[in-house]
Amino acid sequence: QVQLQESGPGLVKPSETLSLICTVSGDSITGYHWSWIRQPPGKGLEWIGNIYSNGNTNYNPSLKSRVTISVDTSKKQFSLKLSSVTAADTAVYYCARVVPSRAYYCSGDGCYSSSWFDPWGQGILVTVSS
Amino acid sequence: EIVLTQSPGTLSLSPGERATLSCRASQTISSSYLAWYQQRPGQSPRLLIYGASSRASGIPDRFSGSGSGTDFTLTISRLEPEDFAVYYCQQYGSSPTFGQGTKVEIK
C-alpha cells in the first residue's frame, strides 16, 4: 500500500524559497501523477500543482509564477519549491497521489489530466516568519 | 475557476442521526467529476467518494454521494462517533478546487 511522507524545514523566512520533499514508499513512483496541496491553519484546502508521469507539470494559476514541482524517480521522491514566500504561505503542506481517471481539462496552455487525490501524506506545517 | 460553496458551515447532530451536506458549484461540473473527503482533527484528508457517487475502498456504506451538474450531496445515513469531522468537496472537471468545508459536530 502506497505511503507518502513530507519532509523539509518547518520555518522559512519571508522572501525566501520554501522547499519540501515527498517520499513515496510501498509502490512505484513511475507511472503515476503526483500532487501538492496546502491548508492554512484553520482554513480549507488549496491545490498547488501536479507533476505527471511524463514529467509535465500543471500549477494553480494563482501560484504558477512562484511554484516548481519536480520528480527524482531514482529516490522515489518528488519536490515542491515555492519562491518569494510571505506569511500568507504559512500552511500545512500535503503531498498526494493523483488517482488515474479519464478526467481531463484544457486551459490556455494545454490539456491536463485531472482527478481526485488518494492517498495523502500526513502533512508538514511550514511557518513563514522572520 | 470553479468555486465550490458548501453548506451548512456547521452541522450539529447527535450520533445515530442523518447528516446531509451540500456542495454547490459556480458552473456545471462535467461528468460529475466531484469527490468528497473527511478530515478528522490533526489528520490528513481521507477520500470518501469520487465520481460524485462511487465510494472509495474501505468506506462504510453509510456514506453516500449524489448529484450532478452544479448540485451535489454527501449523506451519512447514521452518524457514528468517528464521523464527527470536517468534510470537503473537490471538483476535478477543471483546475482542481475545494469547497470551504462543512464541520459536523456533536450536538
Image: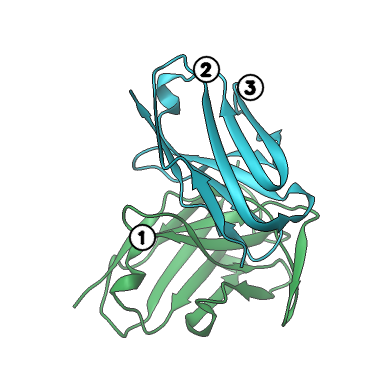
Chain colours: A green, B cyan
Q: CA distance from mark 3 to mark 2?
A: 10 Å
Q: Quadrant of residue A70?
A: bottom right
Pointer 2: what residue? B78
Query: CB atoms at circles 3 and 1 under 8 Å apart?
Result: no
**SS for tag 1?**
loop
For the N terminus of chain A, give its image quadrant.
top right
Residue at image location 74% in from the left, 47% down from the top: B32
Marked residue chain, label 1:
A
Q: Report x, y in % for residue A73.
A: 62, 67
**SS for tag 2?**
loop
Pointer 3: what residue? B61
* Number of the front mark, 3 or 2: 2
Q: Taking B45 as reference, is A9 left or right?
A: left
Q: Which mark is residue A40?
A: 1
Residue at image location 47% in from the left, 17% down from the top: B17
**In terms of sequence position, does the residue under pointer 3 or pointer 2 come before the other?**
3
Q: Report x, y in % for residue B65.
A: 65, 34
Type of amino acid under label 1 = Pro
Co-location on one chain, circles 1 and 2: no
Q: CA distance from mark 3 to mark 1?
A: 31 Å
Type of amino acid under label 2 = Arg
Q: Report x, y in % for residue B93.
A: 71, 58
Q: Residues within 10 Å of mark 3 (few under 14, many from 20)?
A: few
